[in-house]
Amino acid sequence: MNMTELSVLNEHFGIDDQLTFSEGPGGLAVVEIVNSLAVATIALQGAHLLSWIPRGEQPVIWLSRDARFKAGQSIRGGVPVCWPWFGPHATHPSYPAHGFARSVPWQVCETKTIEDGATFVAFRVMQTDATNVFWPHTSELELGIKVGATLELDLITRNTGPESITIGDALHTYFAVSDVRHIAVDGLDGCTYIDKLDSDKRKQQSGPVTFNAETDRIYLDASADCLINDAGMQRRIRIGKRGSRSTVVWNPWLEKAERMGDMGENGYLNMVCVESTNAADDVVTIAPGDEHHLWVSYQLETLA
Ligand code: TA6
């Protein structure tokens, strides 16, 4: 995006020094949000939140030191938007994993200051000939982000066409942790999960999720809040959600992280993905004229 386009965005959507558009890493356009409650950075490509830091806290969202910032390529870390499918495409293996939404340009459609001091920004994906190859349906996709002491994201799929559509979607969030070997994720006890590392076998979770190896699980019919308990950072991250029936928990561990090449040295130790999702059995069918919201809230709690 060139300087003229950035200045037009700042003119139309900027909010003093609270919300500004600028050129970010790799030349990607970003929104910088600075308010009394938090600071955040969002790339316009993919409406990809890269960073959220509540005032007086450590970063809550993890971003790889070796993330690649290139047009059309997904960024390692932050909150990638997976849409209109999760994981590999069911019938076209050549289609991009996790859909195309995270690697295409999004348009800004609204910015405003909220009465509690938070800042709101909304983005919309524009359908193009390129996206129609992957998704030949008439629909709208919007993401609203509220940046405050709590972070809220609302991913809205609107079916504006004449036929039902079925989507898989996710907010594929990378959370920053002190050491993945010393955290526990509560909220999934008793849930059935698909173990992606064991021939998609279905297993049952007993107690909190802990990590001592590569972990890649799709928890089904999982609607409760999840809690990332991180004694090392003396905090708990509460993950609330609505409109998401699956929760994916993922850490690539050492070998896969090295193969991926953009996780940064030992980066896997300082992140965990807890992804509010609709995947596998939980994909969503939207009737003509209807819309579906996948909504999440993230907030910090102090570990006593
Ligand atoms: O959400 C877990 C997962 O599906 C893993 O299997 C792994 O592929 C991860 O997503 C990252 O996928 P990406 O396409 O961003 O490299």
Image: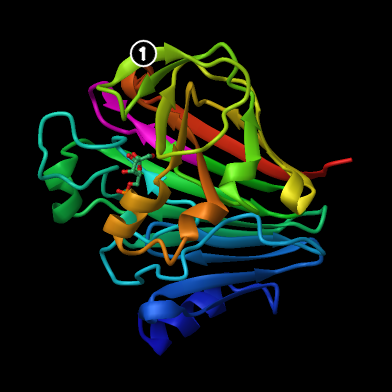
Instruction: For residue 48, say whether it is visible.
Output: no
Percent of width and height locating residue 122: 53, 54
Q: Is residue 148 above or below residue 2?
A: above
Hey, what amino acid is under mark 1? Arg
Tell me which corner region of the image, top left, top right, bottom left or bottom right, holds residue 200.
Answer: top left
Q: Is 179 left or right of 264, judged from the image as shown?
A: right
Relative depth, front residue between 72 and 8? 72
Percent of width and height locating residue 244: 50, 26
Percent of width and height locating residue 199: 25, 22
Magenta-span inclusion, residue 159: yes
Magenta-span inclusion, residue 160: yes
Q: How many residues crowd mark 1 within 10 Å: few (<14), some (14–19), many (20+)?
A: some
Q: Is 254 left or right of 225, judged from the image as shown?
A: left
Residue at (15, 54) in percent of width and height: 130
Q: Where is the C terminus found, in terms of image quarters?
A: top right
User: What span is colored magenta in the figure?
Assistant: 155-169
Residue at (36, 20) in percent of width and height: 194
In the rendered image, which residue does mark 1 sit on?
Answer: 202
Q: Main secondary structure of the magenta part?
A: strand
Q: Is residue 33 above or below residue 138?
A: below
Relative depth, front residue between 25 and 302? 302
Q: Quadrant of ligand 1?
A: top left
Q: Where is the N terminus found, in terms of image quarters?
A: bottom left
Residue at (55, 48) in percent of width and height: 144
Disc 1 on helix, strand or loop? strand
Tell me which corner region of the image, top left, top right, bottom left or bottom right, holds residue 216.
Answer: top left
